[in-house]
Image: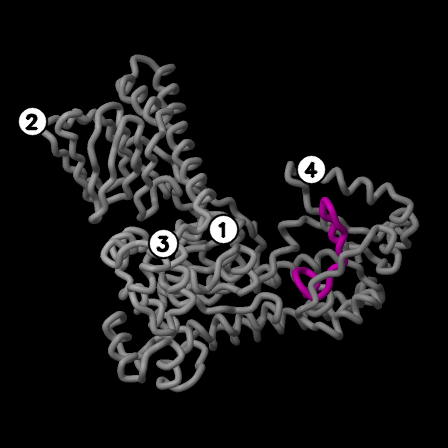
Amino acid sequence: MKNMIVSEWEESHFPLYTADSIQSVYSTSNRPLHHIHERLSVLIAIVSGKGSLKTNDQMYELTEGSVILLPAHSEAELTANSTHPLHAYKLVIHARERESSLPAGAMMQKSEAASNSVVYFFPNEPAIVANVEELYVHRLPENEIRHVQNQIVFHQIILQLLQGQGAKYAASEQPSMERSIAYLENHFSEKITREQLAEIAGVSRSHYSILFKQMTGFSPSDYLSRLRVHRAKELLISGSGTLREIALKVGYKDEFYLSRRFKQQTGAAPSGYNRGKFERIAVLLSPYASHLLLLGLEPAIIISDSSEYVNTSDLQPPQSITFININCSIEQVKSLLLEADIELIIGAQEHLDLSGFQAEHLRAIAPVAEVSWMDMGWKEHLRIIAQIIQRQERAERWLAEFELEEQAARSLVGQSKAANETITILVIKPDQLFIYGNRNFGYVIYQSLGLKPPVKVKQQMDMLGDRFHSIPIDLSELAGYAGDRMLVIIFPDIKGSIEHSEAIFKSVYWEELRSVQQGNVHVLDLDEWIPYNPISIRLQLQRAVDLFTANQ
């Protein structure tokens, strides 16, 4: 009980975009070639004329209104048409993703406009070109008003790029090349030829290899090898079979061929695969990040819809976690994971399904260790993750300490009024009511402290154990779950309002509850009681003791 409670949730921070430089480029018959090699992302906007841009063995035909966004460290050649001199602007974009002024432990989100490894080509975007031209014309602002206008114009360009990228993904509906890559990802353990893949994509075999490398950064054979070796790593992590059995499962004829490929890719034989040396891990959804932090390993990347992590006085705050929004396209996520040199991805199949991803989508980047979210509770999550990264002793030591804290807390609360009461956990969301069970702060109330749940909740707990999350109810059913004491959490609506809860609190169903009439209702803070991970549970245990023993 010695830990000082600190804020559990922190905001994630998007990058700050700045224009590093802007340049006017003329390519004519006398000087047709312009080399591009920048350490940052580069936007080329074609004002007039015709020409082409070559990068990574791919050629893009450019005309007036064309826009092309090159990733950082790209090498390209801009060439004018012999009869149509080319006038373009080259805008170098800097996405500053870390600032010393950020709060300790705050997470950065990766830039979607300037941190991808793929080329974006927009054949006709005159609005972007016009904004780039305006930025160039006023590149030396004569006063602060013009300077602010430049900032607005520049960020309008970034907005247009982001919208254009999103439109490309929305309109693609998995085109032929993506279908062929998906086929490879789902059938890598079978015999697959480049001719088969090219046929699926509807292009020639030679052109297929060029397009494949442009989209993934790998040749088809290298991509296939990564899929197989990473799947072998997953099976080694889970201890699923002998080396020969693993080789056959991933598509190799025997363990010797697997060993050869494994060593080519990793530098070590499968028998020497050391899970204890993981340094760069990505997690899908935030709770597993807290498990890793507790085990002394900071995840490099969190893919999530929120930036939850836990920050307590006895835990080193995160130093350099990058946040990727789960609503990014799979292509963007893969690109950012590859750029970060991720060695392992930890996630639950349930979360993969909700995000629209599959393990197959991510396996070419790194092995995917699946840890089920709903089939087990937080203690088993911790044990399994500790086993994956070979830190079991640390996990068991922490759990043993926590169990002593649970015993002490149970003893204290056992002397309070709550020990003889039925406790109901009610969660009010904008469109639904829930009675909570064994997960989130239900674990602390019913498991750690051993307090009494409503009869119907107890039945579900006995039947489902740690898998029992909650029961959705109608307001008219509330009396059937109401106990002597009511713990309430309110989720705000999308605008941040909790006005929807007023209808509950003013209803005859609410006013008739014994706990309401006796003043035994506690409205609790959402952020302090909902996170479900070891450190949050520990903090909730401290809060629960304070809640039930105050004024005793």
View extreme (left): residue: 30
As measured in the structure, the alpha-carbon distance from the residue carrying label 4 to the one carrying label 2 is 65 Å
**Residue at (27, 84) in percent of width and height:** 256
As measured in the structure, the alpha-carbon distance from the residue carrying label 3 to the one carrying label 2 is 38 Å
As measured in the structure, the alpha-carbon distance from the residue carrying label 4 to the one carrying label 3 is 45 Å
**Residue 125 falls in which quadrant of the image?**
top left
**Residue at (27, 81) in percent of width and height:** 257
Name the residue type under label 2: Asn
Name the residue type under label 1: Ile
Q: Which residues are magenta?
A: 427-444
Q: Which residue is mark 1?
A: 326
> Mark 1 Cα within 10 Å, few/some/many (few <14, many 20+)?
many
- Disc 4, disc 3: CB below 8 Å? no
Q: Which residue is mark 3?
A: 177
Q: Which residue is mark 2?
A: 30
Q: Which residue is mark 4?
A: 497
Residue 429 falls within the magenta-colored stretch = yes
Q: Earlier in the sequence, mark 1 or mark 3?
A: 3
